[in-house]
């Protein structure tokens, strides 16, 4: 099924069920008021939400309405946790090479991950904020799982069953700030913006054979000002799969329902696939030409991130953001 959140005066919005073609929707009234409420009682809520979607697909819901993507918040407007991993090692290697540092020791043995800002997620049509100064605003196209309650020390073989939904993500990074802060030993907190989610979250079964229970294998189309930045495949060069990173994330403690776990920036070794972030392109340009040629994002630039199925239909809807003026929240 496909779920989204209608923006309302309430902080967590209103849960709606979305048709598979992303054209129609119906409120999940009487089942769950918000997506977090559904996640908290998933075993009871999910079958009822699926039944409601079937009614929506057959046109038997009188309360259905045309879906307007511009009226949607993030599917999960705020979460109990946002954990970003880095399972595409090509991205880590290129991004760190651009900063002149080496990957962490043992990065091919244990997946790296970090806690991020989770109190607010941007909607797919929200303005992409640009802090003042030379910050090096960059996109990071990835996908993420929204989890149910996951017990501590969950083995990999059992981890996949706790995935409730998938979303696309723009995990924007301030490259200049990030590099300066990390070089001083301050960590990456100041180098990250709020994360943007796709308009719609989908259950794994909506992905068909593209989801094999461990990883998703489809191109992620990333554009800047209508120029294709890249279409790297999410199933290629994924060094650690989702069951592995879920298991790793529970090594010391469990995870609450509503945890969002990201894959990290999608990155393929094949340069013909392009890029899901500007930093990688700048690193390749530096290798080939001695210096980068592509600029980071500036006010008015348009960003688009989307994934389509094998028939060319959008799965999650598209992230479409315009970069705002410097310093304007």
Image: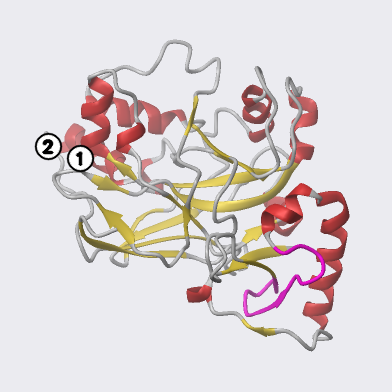
The secondary element bearing badge 2 is classed as loop
Q: Which mark is residue 91?
A: none
Write down the quadrant of residue 134 in the picture. top left
- Chain part drawn in magenta: 17-33
Colouring rule applied to residues: secondary structure
Q: Which mark is residue 285?
A: 1
| Circles 1 and 2: CB atoms closer than 8 Å | yes
Is the residue 100 above or below the residue 57 in the image?
above
Residue shown at 54% from the left, 23% from the top: 111
Residue beneath disc 2: 291
Viewer-proximal residue among 43 and 267: 43
Chief secondary structure of the magenta portion = loop
Write down the quadrant of residue 205 in the picture. bottom right
Residue 303 in picture, x, y percent from top left: 34, 61
Instruction: Tell me: 91 left or right of 295.
Output: right
Instruction: Tell me: 167 left or right of 222.
Output: right
The secondary element bearing badge 1 is classed as helix
Viewer-proximal residue among 246 and 75: 75
View extreme (top): residue:
105
The quadrant in which the N terminus is found is bottom right
- 183 inside magenta stretch: no
The quadrant in which the C terminus is found is bottom left
Residue 129 in picture, x, y percent from top left: 30, 56
Residue 257 in picture, x, y percent from top left: 70, 42
Q: CA distance from mark 1 to mark 2?
A: 6 Å
Residue 210 in picture, x, y percent from top left: 67, 51
Is the residue 13 above or below the residue 142 in the image?
below
Viewer can see residue 233: no
């Amino acid at each position: 099924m496909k779920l989204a959140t209608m923006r309302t005066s309430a902080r967590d919005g209103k849960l709606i069920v979305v048709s598979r073609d992303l054209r129609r929707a119906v409120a999940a009234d009487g089942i769950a008021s918000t997506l977090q409420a559904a996640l908290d009682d998933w075993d009871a809520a999910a079958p009822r939400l699926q039944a409601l979607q079937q009614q929506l697909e057959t046109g038997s819901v009188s309360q259905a309405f045309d879906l307007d993507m511009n009226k949607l918040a993030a599917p999960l407007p705020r979460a109990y946790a946002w954990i970003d991993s880095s399972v595409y090692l090509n991205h880590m290697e290129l991004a760190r090479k651009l900063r002149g540092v080496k990957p962490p020791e043992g990065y091919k043995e244990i997946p790296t991950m970090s806690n991020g800002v989770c109190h607010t997620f941007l909607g797919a049509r929200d303005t992409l904020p640009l802090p003042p100064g030379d910050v090096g605003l960059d996109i990071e196209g990835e996908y993420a799982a929204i989890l149910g309650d996951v017990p501590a020390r969950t083995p990999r073989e059992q981890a996949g069953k706790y995935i409730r939904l998938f979303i696309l993500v723009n995990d924007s990074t301030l490259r200049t700030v990030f590099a300066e802060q990390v070089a001083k030993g301050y960590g990456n907190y100041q180098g990250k913006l709020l994360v943007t989610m796709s308009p719609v979250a989908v259950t794994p079964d909506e992905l068909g054979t593209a989801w094999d229970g461990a990883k998703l294998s489809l191109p992620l189309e990333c554009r800047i000002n209508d120029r294709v930045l890249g279409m790297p495949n999410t199933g290629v060069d994924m060094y650690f799969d989702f069951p592995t990173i879920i298991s790793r994330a529970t090594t010391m403690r469990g995870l609450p329902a509503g945890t969002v776990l990201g894959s990290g920036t999608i990155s393929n070794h094949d340069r013909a696939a392009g890029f899901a972030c500007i930093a990688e392109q700048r690193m390749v340009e530096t290798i080939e030409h001695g210096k980068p040629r592509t600029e980071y994002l500036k006010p008015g630039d348009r960003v688009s991130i989307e994934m389509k199925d094998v028939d060319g239909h959008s799965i999650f809807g598209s992230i479409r953001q315009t970069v705002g003026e410097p310093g304007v929240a």
